[in-house]
Image (tube, grey):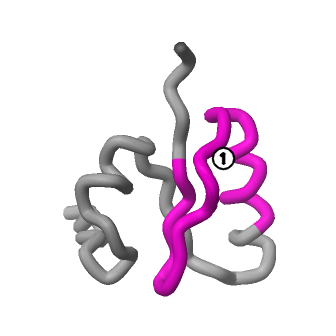
């Protein structure tokens, strides 16, 4: 079974999708100046809500 991914924004999770679809969705959000991240479907189930997502810190 192929890995499924979820796009997370400040207030929502997308439906699980393929990696290619997740990348397309992310690029679409970026063109609209919406911050979004791709996470695995497993991680989305673990954190349950977008508010529990910890934004990565790039140092």
Above/below status of 17 relative to 38: above
Residue indicated by mark 1: 22
Residue 16 falls left or right of residue 25: left
Residue 17 drawn in magenta? yes
Give the x, y percent position of residue 3: 50, 25
The residue that appears at 68% across and 46% down in the rendered structure is: 23
- Which element type, helix, strand or loop, lies under badge 1? helix
Give the x, y percent position of residue 10: 47, 84
The residue that appears at 70% across and 70% down in the rendered structure is: 30
Above/below status of 52 relative to 27: below
Residue 8 falls left or right of residue 54: right
**Camera-side residue: 29 or 42?**
42
Residue 56 falls left or right of residue 27: left
**Camera-side residue: 58 or 23?**
23
Residue 57 drawn in magenta? no
Residue bounds of the magenta highlight: 6-28
**Camera-side residue: 54 or 40?**
40
Q: Tell me the crowding category of disc 1: few under 14, some 14 to 19, or many 20 or more residues within 10 angstroms, Cα based.
A: many
Quarter occupied by the C terminus: bottom left
Give the x, y percent position of residue 40: 42, 42
Give the x, y percent position of residue 57: 23, 67
The residue that appears at 50% across and 52% down in the rendered structure is: 38
């Amino acid at each position: 079974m192929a890995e499924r991914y979820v796009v997370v924004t400040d207030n929502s999770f997308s439906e699980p999708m393929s990696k290619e679809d997740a990348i397309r969705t992310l690029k679409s959000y970026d063109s609209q100046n919406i911050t979004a991240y791709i996470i695995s479907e497993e991680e989305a189930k673990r954190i349950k809500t977008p508010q529990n997502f910890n934004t990565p810190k790039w140092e």
